Amino acid sequence: MFKKIGKYDLVKEVIGKCPWIIDVKKESATQADPYIIALVIDESKKQMSKITNYTDPTTYVIVTEDNGLRNAGRSYKIKSVKLLNMFEIESWSF
């Protein structure tokens, strides 16, 4: 899924609040985690503006094995699950 994030200010905010989410030794172009958090925040705000009775800001769930991304998500009250857990939750079998 490729989407434009409304404002890069969100990405800067995420990095400021959760500096561990990026590895300063890596190229910035290869680090998507702050953009994932910013995308969830941006999409959640759009949903809240569309729905008058919207009460759950955690509609979106990040599927990841990465603990840094999971911890950053928790900082914003974003739910996350590991891939195998998602299979169980969704009752998927292969």
Image (cartoon, rainbow, N blue to C red):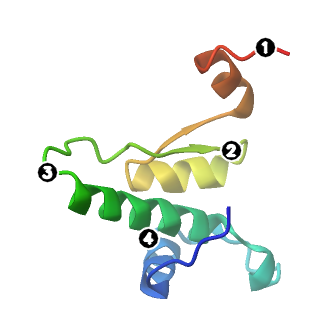
Residue 87, visible in the rendered structure = yes
In front: label 2 or label 1: 1
Please say if the residues under marks 4 and 1 sit with CB atoms less than 8 Å apart. Answer: no
Q: Earlier in the sequence, mark 2 or mark 1?
A: 2
Q: Which quadrant does the N terminus fall into?
A: bottom right
Q: Which quadrant does the C terminus fall into?
A: top right
The residue depicted at 24 percent of the width and 58 percent of the height is 50
**Amino acid type, callout 4:** Lys
Residue furthest left as drawn: 52
Task: Assess disc 3: are there few (<14), some (14-19) or many (≥20) residues with their C-alpha within 10 Å of its C-alpha.
Answer: few
The residue depicted at 69 percent of the width and 69 percent of the height is 32
**Picture disc at residue 52:** 3
Q: Earlier in the sequence, mark 1 or mark 3?
A: 3
Residue furthest front as drawn: 50
**Amino acid type, callout 1:** Ser
Q: Earlier in the sequence, mark 3 or mark 2?
A: 3
Marks 3 and 2, how far apart at CA: 30 Å
**Amino acid type, callout 2:** Thr
Residue marked by disc 2: 64
Residue 28 position in % (x across, y down): 74, 83
Q: Is residue 81 above or below residue 12?
A: above
In front: label 1 or label 3: 3
Marks 2 and 1, how far apart at CA: 19 Å
**Picture disc at residue 93:** 1
Q: Nearer the viewer, residue 3 or 81?
A: 3
Residue marked by disc 4: 17
Q: Is residue 56 above or below residue 27?
A: above
In front: label 4 or label 1: 1
